[in-house]
Amino acid sequence: MKNLKGKVAAITGAASGIGRALALNLADEGCHLAISDINVAGLQETADMARAWNKTVRITTHQVDTANREQVKQYAEDAAKAHGAVHLIINNAGVLLLETLEDVSYKDFEWIMGINLWGVIYGCKEFLPYLKKQDAAHIVNISSVNGIFTNPNNGPYCTAKYAVRGFTETLAQELADTRVKVACVHPGGIKTNIANNARFYKSCDPSLVREDALAIFNKAMAGTSADKAAKIIIAGIKKNKMRIMVGTDAYVLDWLKRLFPVGFQKITGRKTAAAWMKKMAGLKS
Ligand SMILES: NC(=O)c1ccc[n+]([C@@H]2O[C@H](COP(=O)([O-])OP(=O)(O)OC[C@H]3O[C@@H](n4cnc5c(N)ncnc54)[C@H](O)[C@@H]3O)[C@@H](O)[C@H]2O)c1
């Protein structure tokens, strides 16, 4: 979709991080917004900020839990009704959970799959009928570099993000002959609230408490700003890229995994990954 001016974009998880930055940058492009989140106060803040960025765009806010199919269905209906059309859905809402696959409770596993996978599936299926009515439309699903390689104690997140990639790449093939373009986004580390809001039980090194894990993520891993991430994603949408990598780390990690599919999994395994991450964050081993 080359020109976003005057189009209507729906974004989930728009109260914070990448979702908020996408809303502001799309407003800057002249795109009307139907933004959603479970966090109503944060969502209102995003709407106010977007209005300050561009007074000419129409903005509606929608309280939506993406893990709830009925709410996502209603969101699509309300967004289309309020704006007369929807051209772009960005399935962005996501959460993080650190625990081993052995010990993770089914409740926590279902929580993360509900938001990170089912939320994406509901968003695609419920918005698709509205997108297909347009001359040009786009579906953008936010996976992760963890849709390409895995880390120990991050299994539920990796499971969801690999599944988002499988779902999105299949959808792109199925919609190839339509006017609806599909993109899968793989961000590396982005400075947002995702780690601060994570359900933290155990990270890959048992000696790391929550504060250490947060310090590692915020200091050593999250190298790209949310604003930069949003600009890269929007540039990818304009070029109709099917695969959008965000951040130098994402490119490097993707290539290492391709070159050394087994060896790379070993170095991102427990001992090496934990020692490297501690060093990067300036923590004692
Ligand atoms: N930050 C990173 O390093 C990074 C890397 C790769 C992928 N991602 C992905 O980017 C996306 C955005 O995450 P972020 O980093 O901006 O995090 P963030 O925590 O800053 O923002 C996530 C937003 O999702 C919302 N949300 C959570 N549960 C929800 C639900 N049930 N329904 C609706 N909204 C809900 C939150 O309220 C929040 O506003 C996620 O899918 C995440 O997995 C992030």
Image (cartoon, grey):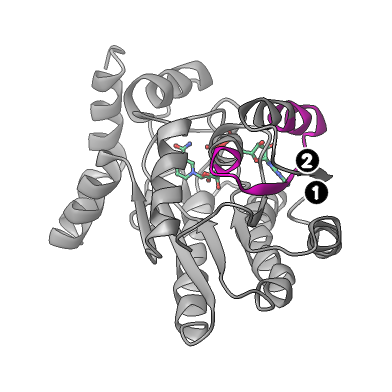
Q: x, y percentage for residue 84? A: 80, 63
Mark 1 near ligand 1 (CB under 8 Å)?
yes
Residue located 69% across and 41% down the image: 57
Residues under labels 2 and 1: Cα distance?
Answer: 5 Å
Q: Is residue 69 left or right of residue 103?
A: right
Is label 2's Cβ within 8 Å of ligand 1?
yes
Q: Residues within 10 Å of mark 2 (few under 14, many from 20)?
A: some
Which residue range is magenta in the image? 26-47
**Residues at circles 2 and 1 in contact by the CB criterion of under 8 Å:** yes
> Residue drawn at (70%, 63%), measured in percent from left and top?
86
Q: Specify whether 29 is left or right of 284.
A: right
Foreground residue among 37 and 282: 37
Q: Measured along the vertical axis of the image, is residue 153 above or below residue 82? A: above
- Seen at 34% across and 28% down, the residue is 223
Quarter of the render that holds ligand 1:
top right
Residue 104 visible in the displayed image: yes
* Relative height, residue 275 to residue 254 (above, below): above
Please name whichever residue, 101 or 79, is drawn nearer the observer in this view of the structure: 79
| Residue 199, horizontal then vertical, whole percent | 62, 34
Query: Which of the numbered marks, if any, corresponds to residue 38?
Result: 2
- Label for residue 64? 1
Task: Report x, y in % for residue 168.
Answer: 50, 70
